[in-house]
Amino acid sequence: MRSWLILCVSLVGLLGCEGGAVSVEEPRQTVSPEATLNGVTWVGGDTGGGDTAGRAALRFAEREPLMGDLAHYRIPVRVGAGEHDVVTLHRVVRERAPGRPSRTSRAVFMVHGDGWGFEAAFLSSVGSAHVPADRSLGVFLAQEGVDVWGIDLRWVGVPAGTQDFSFMKDWTLGTHAADVGTGLRLARVVRAMTGSARGSMHLLGWSRGAAIGYAYLNQETRLPRGLRQVDGFIPVDMVVQYAPDEVERRAEACERHAVLNADRAEGRVEGGLLGPAPGIMLQAIGQAATLAPDAPSELVPDDVFGPGTGRPTNRRVAIVSAAATGALLAPLKAITPGYHLMGGTLDATGLPAGLAFISHEGYLYEYAQRSAPYQSLNEVVETEAWLCGLEVPYDDHLSEVKVPVLYVGAAGGMGRYGEHSVSLLGSQDVTVLTARTLPEEYRALDYGHADLFLADDARERVWTPLLQWVRAH
């Protein structure tokens, strides 16, 4: 039987449950990890404090055995008073015995981006019918002795069929950053309770998750150094501010912001540039390609890919959506030129006809079907405002962030465009790792935004250098 845990902790403890997100700006006294778990209440369980509560966090969490000595824990945590004010924390770790995590000196906390939650983003191979179970970043790092933690942001748990999204109206980049701070605190406490190092953690954010990471670090500079939780930052393929000479890119961001802001003014609080329910659309594309790859698609109109192209097959719709993702935004422009999720190969018409870096197309169809149905709109609007150069409350103190940084880019995703954002930080220890197979002028065909996690050679090209950086820092 699966058991689920909702954590609610008093302000003198770990999280604070006064009906809103915990602010990372709140001053706190230095307390021991044991003391920060006092006041935890376990729905369906007992109430405990100190070391008992630490063990309870693992005992009542849902535990899923993976391959070998690996296990995956899920811990839902209440972060506000509303029905949907819940995030899910994840831990992937080696065990000495079932329910007894191994001691580790290295830990990474991962934040996903748009569309896909922690499991789909970082454990995509687990349960796949097309690739080995160990072919995902979370599994790889855990097998190498890293304690892998992560979060499902609030919107990941919103069920399909939801009609009233008013609960999303106040969810912002700041809300998600505060939830990440909550997750980091709990992760550090549980690590200490289970015998691992009590120190701070590396923070990895992919895509919009990296923007949330920047926002979190910006606010963490307001805390005394002894209360800061991040000792290394790994922004993965994201831009939060264009370089000064990228005038055209900035103007395009302003156009996207104007469109989204107008939608928000009319009352929409869910979704993004692809509409109010992009995840449901992706699920439908993946399902259709799985069940009837060669059948004409019922999801798009005739000639959607150009005059005279007719009705594409379900397979073609899935391939083009992955390999020419930016084109779906037309007439708006994507965040970078030629942006795409997965690198593709072209046919005589100039359209993507296959995947360049992923052997099994079924893996793409699975991936699409694992997307979350909905997302909150505010963080998308705010990110576009940030890119446009408008005032946002998330970058005032970035120059005070001094932690080591590893920027991981995909040449066909954000790629080199994300490097300027890293330069906004005050860090002196900065490493840039870009997955590139072609010259920049062919970026529309190069390694894609999701290839960093899904490509056949991602282990060698991306994950191993990332692991080496984590071990060195």
Image: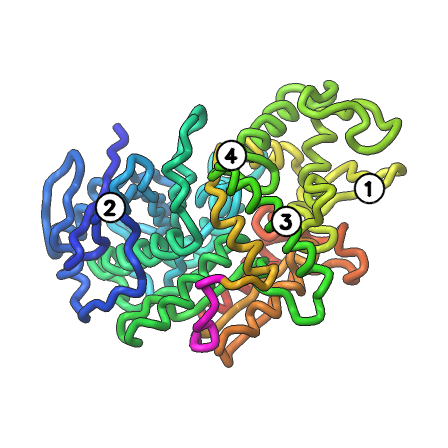
Q: CA distance from mark 4 to mark 3?
A: 26 Å
387 in magenta: no
Which comes before the other along the chain, label 4 or label 3?
A: 3
> Range of the magenta residues?
392-402
**Local crowd size for mark 2, using a 10 Å CA cut-off: few (<14), some (14–19), many (≥20):** few
The residue to which callout 4 is attached is: 370
Tell me: residue 11, above or below residue 126: below
Camera-side residue of 338 and 277 = 277
Which comes before the other along the chain, label 1 or label 4?
A: 1
Secondary structure found at label 3: helix
In x, y percent, where is residue 60?
Answer: 21, 40
Tell me: residue 458, above or below residue 220: above
Q: The residue under label 2 is which amino acid type?
A: Gly
Horizontal side of residue 256 vs 429, given as left or right: right
Q: How is the image coloured?
A: rainbow
Q: Is residue 69 visible?
A: no
- Answer with the quarter of the image where residue 218 lies: bottom left
What residue is drawn where x is 63% and y is 48%?
A: 455
